[in-house]
Amino acid sequence: MNDFNMDKRPTGQANAQNTKDVAVTESLNKIKHKYIVMSGKGGVGKTSTSVNLSLALANQGFNIGIMDVDLHGPDIPRMLGLSGMLTVNDRKKLIPMSYSDNLKAVSIESLSQNKDDAIIWRGPIKYSAIQQFIGDVEWGALDYLIIDSPPGTGDEPLTVAQTIPDAQAIIVTTPQEVSLADVRKSISFCRTVKMEIKGLIENMSGAVCPHCGEAIELFGSGGGEKTAITAGIPFLGRIPFDHRVVACGDTGHSFQEAYPDSEVTKTFVAIAQKIA
């Protein structure tokens, strides 16, 4: 039996993985701060938070990258008004899609010919895809990498925790208890995998009626701040509900540019200043 042939495949696989690891490390070394926006609950506005936080930081002059690791429900390109496919440079690196001079994004949607095709992947393929999003992308020098993740504490956030050891979590919740119960699982996840928590954001926290101006607590208010205090983590801010955020997200327009004097814009600017 030929021992060389037996060992050839594992050695090749090991070398390929080592090459990937080196590419990931080289890419991450050029990025100062990495934040994963996450929540144990779906529908709390993680993607709109990722997008608006990135815009607020970019508007302060920082170089920002958004990495969309919500592989089954990628929405970052649509919310930024980006279309088309990612291209490759002469170094065989993927070039992120550019929203502005200092804001760029990568998403699985920008690698799919048909945007409505379902991504049906198991854990190992997700792990490989997220590694490629880091090591095979020409991110360049960034001040902040904002990582938009799917709900829960599964493959995607776990891969980020394992691949980006200095990533910090920004946890998003809405005020009601059904959301907060799942968010407490996200806090537990971060502590289990030794991921630092940058802070908690309470989204959809109250609203103002567009007709009469009366304040309305759609999902209650204050639950996120109480959870942050109880858990001993920073509370970053309370973002009110504004129906115009939905319209801007659906059409790919910047809410902050369209409504610079809104409470939502002011809050995101304040949160970006806390982070920066």
Image: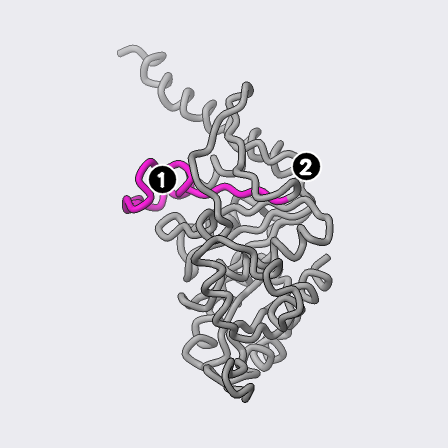
Whether residue 98 appears in magenta in the rendering, the answer is: no
Q: Position of residue 255 (x, y in %)?
A: 56, 61
Q: Position of residue 152 (x, y in %)?
A: 41, 62
Q: Position of residue 229 (x, y in %)?
A: 63, 79
Say which residue label 1 marks. Answer: 125
The mark closer to the camera, 2 or 1, is 2
Task: Write down the quadrant of residue 236 in the picture.
Answer: bottom right
Q: Is residue 114 left or right of residue 135?
A: left
Res 233 visible: no
**Residue sitting at 50 percent across and 41 percent down?**
106
Say which residue label 2 marks. Answer: 141
User: Looking at the picture, does residue 137 appear above or below residue 33?
Assistant: above
Q: Amino acid at mark 2?
A: Ala
User: Looking at the picture, does residue 220 appear above or below residue 268?
Assistant: below
Q: Are marks 2 and 1 in contact (CB under 8 Å)?
A: no
Task: Write down the quadrant of residue 170 in the picture.
Answer: bottom right
- Classed neighbour count for the residue bearing mark 2: other residues with Cα under 10 Å, few (<14), some (14–19), many (≥20): some
Whether residue 105 appears in magenta in the rendering, the answer is: yes
Res 244 visible: yes
Q: Earlier in the sequence, mark 2 or mark 1?
A: 1
**Residue sitting at 63 percent across and 73 percent down?**
263
Q: Nearer the viewer, residue 54 or 39?
A: 54
**Residue sitting at 55 percent across and 63 percent down?**
191
Task: Write down the quadrant of residue 43 in the picture.
Answer: bottom left
- Between marks 2 and 1, how big is the CA–CA gap? 27 Å
Q: Give the quadrant of the N terminus.
A: top left
Q: Amino acid at mark 1?
A: Ile
Q: Secondary structure at mark 2?
A: loop
Q: How many marks?
A: 2
Q: Secondary structure at mark 1?
A: helix
Task: Tell me where the magenta segment starts and ends, as one range.
Answer: 103-127
Q: Nearer the viewer, residue 169 or 176?
A: 176
